[in-house]
Amino acid sequence: MRYFVQFSYQGRSYHGWQKQPNAISVQEVLENAFSLILRETVSLTGAGRTDTGVHAREMFAHFDSDSLFEETALVHRLNAYLPDDIAIVSIFKVSAEAHARFNATERTYEYWIVQNKNPFLVDGAYYVKYPLNIEQMNKAAAILVENKDFECFSKSNTDVKTYLCDVRKAQWIKDEEKLVFTISADRFLRNMVRAIVGTLLDVGLGKSSHTDMEYVLASKDRGKAGVSVPAKGLYLTSIKYPNNIFDHNG
């Protein structure tokens, strides 16, 4: 049977989602837990990768298993074993063809900024002490939705086949003590969100105009965009799938 697992994690202690040599990853910790409890080798295929230090409030992966288990009981057993910074939300049967990565239709990220020093968000938000012009940042963000090619925000030397992304939302809002940037798209390039936020901060700080976003996008040059902001403020918050994925009867 194929199963989807929904989970969340605090990324500070991990070198991202994807398993790699000589560095601890969320995938490795989860696969070890599943394999130990189910007493079989379990391989998880994630909905995508997150970089070192990035958090996920909602993440999905799929795995295949021949074991017989009750999903809710397995969730409890896994959560009792896993470290405090990883939590399983649910496990459910899906069709044999369902794929956590390829069937995802939309992904949403948030980036958190604080403008006043906050000891409770020191590991979960980026502190920017200088005033920011949110109106200008939102004018620049709106230009992202009108474009498709995001090569200028892609990490160098990546082996992607296309830089085209369908960005459906890009907006800053003030949420109590936080300034939150929300961006939704069908897919994201490596380092893309953090590079976008760095470029938007340049606009907010008055280092560039919102109209400069058009120039940066047209350049297709990572060097023309802003610096990448720290990973600690970035959260994967939502992944959408077609409704038929969630047919628990498989």
Image (tube, rainbow, N blue to C red):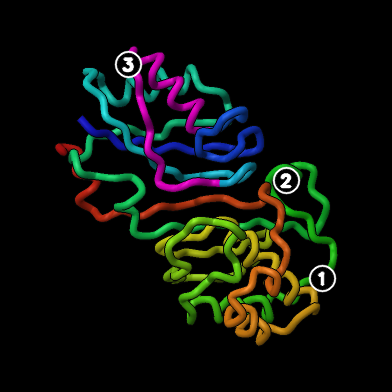
Which residue type carries mark 1?
Pro
Whether the residues at callouts 1 and 2 have beta carbons within 8 Å, the answer is: no
Q: Is residue 190 magenta?
A: no
Q: Is residue 202 left or right of residue 52?
A: right
Residue 169, x across and y down, in percent = 48, 70
Q: Is residue 35 left or right of residue 142?
A: left
The residue that mark 2 highlights is: 121
Question: Farthest residue toward the bottom?
Answer: 211
Q: Nearer the viewer, residue 20 or 247?
A: 20
The residue stretch that appears in magenta: 26-50
Structural crowding at the residue carrying mark 2, measured as other residues with C-alpha within 10 Å and reported as few (<14), some (14–19) or many (≥20): some
Counting residues from the start of the chain, the first of labels 1 and 2 encountered is 2
Q: Secondary structure at mark 3?
A: loop
The residue that mark 1 highlights is: 131
Q: Vertical placement of 87 versus 137: above or below?
A: above
Residue 247, x across and y down, in percent = 19, 43
Q: The N terminus lies in which quarter of the figure?
A: top left
